[in-house]
């Protein structure tokens, strides 16, 4: 039985902790805040509840596997998963609207043809077929296997782009933006594509064409809601850890990783306490560097971590509303920016553009005080860290006003229904997760430059990393996969070749 110290109680860290405990190790988690779940948080006030992190789950199989591998009780015995249908409603810049069914390619094609005109659905359907090929080529090496030293193979673009004639030359789309312009050939279909990237914090203008897997995952595996709010998933993972005798220490900030004979040997906490361990599972690589000063965590042939605050964050606006939710209201609505080109500027940390706003309206009695009220969450991807100061007076409330105005395109009269509102910015994200600037980690992508996250193993023996800033990147499914990979590397050693 080895002693394993885990830094942080995010979803990836807890997924690793549960698996390691089942493998017979003594696992202790040290979390600097007073709760678990990382970015998967809930705001509660006056009987209202709001998910302030992810609002929906894709690839629930990742967490089903976690619960199967760590105990007899399956995931569905501890949380209620609800498949959201329609998957989403979309309101485009020109006023066109379409609701897309969940996990039905034929249904999506038909809906797009009816709303956008004949042929639009066919182009989107053909795109999904190509996206599936990119998924099939990258699923295992990108998501289910450790990031091996020959990670350069993932720089090959897996998306089978359609040849495009341009200025007497034949070219193929190399970026998501080019797929929208050259293959989808409709600004509304392009917005639909780019919206998936924006929701993951990925720049459509520079993302490799392989980012096509992001909408594919939703269409192929569906979108799911956890009854009671997504925080219930974090609670279930935490309780599974506790059942497997994982120890949790909250309010325990780690200040350094201790070494002995060149190997990770424990932690030092802010109160001066020393924790001995045989193995340490760390936090994001950028922050982990500060815990092992003077040590090179990644060799020159490895993926090197980029600064976290170069990535965007999120503003979340929680609305407590008068009057009941309409019976036919859709769980998620996406209201697209009136300036799609300008919105891409948020990745260059310039002025705040007009933003795409996502509206979540869960039909969940647990999140409202009674049937005569409704809780609604508005979310937008925003710049954070360098180049933008969320402490500037008036900036936050002005943006919140703009988000409400955008949401009124989907919910007429919304402003008059608001009892109160609370705004959460990247400042809150930084406080809760420790991510520099309050950035949110994007998922790893094949192809292109700088689209992968660092490996789960480091150059320091006995030191590993789990969570959204490590391979395979951000998002609830990816965090669960990260925990699985770390546990496999620790239990099986360097010969571990990924989940089966």
Image (cartoon, rainbow, N blue to C red):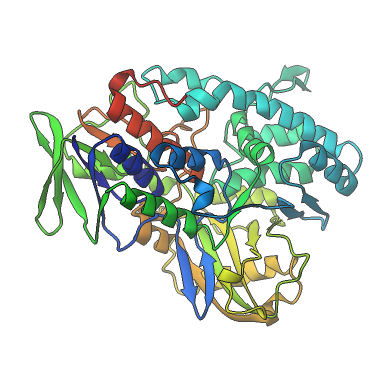
Q: Position of residue 328 (x, y in %)?
A: 78, 65
Q: Write down the quadrant of residue 364 in the picture.
A: bottom right
Question: What residue is drawn where x is 64% and y is 33%?
Answer: 212
Residue 150 point in image, percent of width and height: 40, 16
All told, the count of numbered labels is 0
Query: Which of 395 and 108 lies nearest the eye of the viewer?
Result: 108
Q: Is residue 466 left or right of residue 202?
A: left
Res 358 → quadrant: bottom right
- The residue lying toward the viewer, choosing from 120 and 9, is 9
In the picture, which quadrant includes the N terminus?
top left
The residue nearer to you, when weighing 441 against 82, is 82
Query: Quick one: 150 or 142, which is closer to the camera?
Result: 142
* Image position, residue 394 (x, y; %): 50, 74
Residue 158 visible in the snapshot: no
Q: Residue at the location (45% across, 31% down)?
A: 452
The correct choice, above or below, for 188 with respect to 482 in the image is below
Residue 372 lies, with reference to residue 490, above or below; the image says below
Q: Position of residue 319 (x, y in %)?
A: 59, 73
Residue 253 visible in the current orientation: yes
In screen coordinates, is 490 left or right of 233?
A: left
**Rendered image quadrant of residue 15:** top left
Residue drawn where x is 64% and y is 47% of the image: 223
**Residue at 36% over, 36% down:** 305
Residue 313 placement, left or right of 150: right
**Residue sitting at the far right:** 118
């Amino acid at each position: 039985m080895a002693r394993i110290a885990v830094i942080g109680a995010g979803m990836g860290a807890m997924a690793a902790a549960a698996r390691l405990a089942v493998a017979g190790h003594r696992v202790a988690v040290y979390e600097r805040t007073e709760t678990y779940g990382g970015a998967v948080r809930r705001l509660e006030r006056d009987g209202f509840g709001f998910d302030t992190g992810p609002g929906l789950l894709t690839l629930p199989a990742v967490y089903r596997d976690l619960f199967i591998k760590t105990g007899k009780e399956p995931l569905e015995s501890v949380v209620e998963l609800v498949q959201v249908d329609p998957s989403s409603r979309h309101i485009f810049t020109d006023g066109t609207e379409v609701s897309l069914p969940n996990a039905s390619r034929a249904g999506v094609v038909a809906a797009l043809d009816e709303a956008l005109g004949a042929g639009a659905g066919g182009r989107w359907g053909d795109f999904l077929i190509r996206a599936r090929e990119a998924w099939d080529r990258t699923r295992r090496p990108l998501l289910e296997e450790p990031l091996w030293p020959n990670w350069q193979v993932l720089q090959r673009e897996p998306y089978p782009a359609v040849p495009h004639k341009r200025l007497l030359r034949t070219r193929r789309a190399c970026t998501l933006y080019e797929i929208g312009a050259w293959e989808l050939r409709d600004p509304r279909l392009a917005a639909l594509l780019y919206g998936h990237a924006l929701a993951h914090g990925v720049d459509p203008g520079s993302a490799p064409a392989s980012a096509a897997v992001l909408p594919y995952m939703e269409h192929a595996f569906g979108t799911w809601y956890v009854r009671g709010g997504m925080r219930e998933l974090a609670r279930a993972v935490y309780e599974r850890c506790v059942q497997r005798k994982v120890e949790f220490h909250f309010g325990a900030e780690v200040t350094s990783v201790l070494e002995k004979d060149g190997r990770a040997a424990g932690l030092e906490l802010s109160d001066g306490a020393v924790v001995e361990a045989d193995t340490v599972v760390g936090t994001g690589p950028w922050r982990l560097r500060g815990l092992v000063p003077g040590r090179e965590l990644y060799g020159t042939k490895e993926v090197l971590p980029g600064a976290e605050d170069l990535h965007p964050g999120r503003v979340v606006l929680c609305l407590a509303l008068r009057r009941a939710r309409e019976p036919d209201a859709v769980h998620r609505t996406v209201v697209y920016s009136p300036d799609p080109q300008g919105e891409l500027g948020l990745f260059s940390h310039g002025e705040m553009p007009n933003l795409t706003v996502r509206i979540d309206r869960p039909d969940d009695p647990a999140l409202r005080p009674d049937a005569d009220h409704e809780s609604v969450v508005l979310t937008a991807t925003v710049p954070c860290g360098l180049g933008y100061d969320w402490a500037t007076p008036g900036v936050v409330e002005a943006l919140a006003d703009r988000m409400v105005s955008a949401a009124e395109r989907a919910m007429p009269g919304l402003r008059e229904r608001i009892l109160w509102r609370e705004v959460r910015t990247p400042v809150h994200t930084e406080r809760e997760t420790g991510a520099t600037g309050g950035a949110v980690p994007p998922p790893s992508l094949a192809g292109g430059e700088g689209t992968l996250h660092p490996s789960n193993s480091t150059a320091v023996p006995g030191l590993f990393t789990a969570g959204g800033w490590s391979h395979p990147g951000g998002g609830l499914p990816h965090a669960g996969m990260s925990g699985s990979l770390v546990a496999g590397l620790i239990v099986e050693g360097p010969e571990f070749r990924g989940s089966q």
